[in-house]
Amino acid sequence: MSNAKPLIKGRILTGHRPTGPRHIGHLVGTIENWAQMQDSNECYFLIADLHVLTTDYEHSDHIQNNILEVLADWLAAGIDPERSTLVLQSAIPAHSQLTVLFSMLVTVPRMSRVPTYKEQVKELHLQPSLGLLTYPTLQAADILIYKANAVPVGEDQLPHIELTREIAHRFNQVYGDTFPEPEALLSPTPRLPGTDNRTMHTSYNNAIFLRETPEETTQKIMNMYTDPTRIHPTDPGHVENNPVFAYLDAFDPDLKGVEELKERYRLGKVGDVTVKRHLAEVLNDYLAPLRQRRREIIAHPKELRNLLTVGTEHARPLAEANLHEIQGKMGLNPNHS
Ligand code: TRP
């Protein structure tokens, strides 16, 4: 039956911070997984612009353009605004209002133990802001304001979903059953290394971006880190912990071919350059249709903005209704405005 509505399993909320164009780690770690869920779930995809300010408040002039870059990547990779709701976080004050309410239910020591916070503090070399400390509380509000059941994220976000579940649990315990305890969902490839084998990161100079040209991608691949113990193409090679093969596993549709290539690499029967040339072709082929769509989408920034506005207005009544319910349960009078 072609136009039978698929069964809706649950409500999903997830999102990204608009920090710049998306890379292939975002693609396989999150966006492709999200796109697949649109058939059988009610999906909300959040542009978390407030979260950008937790670290970058001094460089906030990029945010508006980055929102468009992220949206273009999402849509090109299959996020469908006809079926799903795009939400701009800062445009719905209920997200921030719920953050204040949730901040009453968590302790400061609990927040300072969040691993992403501890890492950021180590890296930043400055005094962490109060906003950074409460970052995961805002994220919990993003999720629970829609009473989402599931949150598909990258591996790095798991501590935040754990905190979200704790907040939901605590709230339900004190004020009565209100929130589902949302489940974290990982993609089949939750982690893709960068071209230097560190974590792929927009600011590490080790990312392959969806929007770049095939030539740029090829050049990055030809300079990739491989097996450091291998000097000559005839040396036996290591496939494990080798990002070139991690990429082939993620992008080469010819699974049998990849296994054969790995075997020849292990035996010292194929050189790095040959493997990299093959990878460049595979990855550029994989990204070609997405890149084509992206060029068409980014050419119409007004339409992109409009899609975000329409989605946000669609989400707003649900967020506001839930906020009112929560305020009431917490002993406030939501009608007194
Ligand atoms: N912290 C997420 C990231 O950096 C972005 C985010 C904000 C998010 N709110 C969210 C993800 C709610 C999932 C659900 O990628």
Image (cartoon, helix red, strand yellow):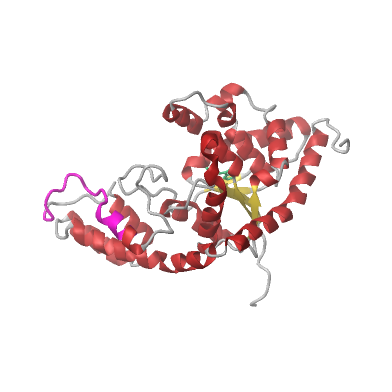
Q: Please give the range of residues in magenta.
A: 217-234
**Quadrant of residue 176 in the image?**
top right
Q: Residue at x 47, y 25 (%)?
A: 126
Q: Residue at x 23, y 60 (%)?
A: 275
Q: Is residue 220 left or right of residue 39?
A: left
Say if 14 sits above or below 32 in the image.
above
Q: Is residue 294 inside the magenta stretch?
A: no
Name the residue at the right extreme: 336
Give the x, y percent position of residue 285: 37, 68
Q: Is residue 23 left or right of residue 263?
A: right
Give the x, y percent position of residue 209: 41, 55
Residue 219 in sight here: yes
Q: Residue at x 43, y 59 (%)?
A: 211
Q: Nearer the viewer, residue 245 or 98?
A: 98
**Ligand 1: quadrant of the figure:** top right
Quadrant (top left, top right, bottom left, bottom right) of the C terminus: top right
Q: Is residue 220 inside the magenta stretch?
A: yes
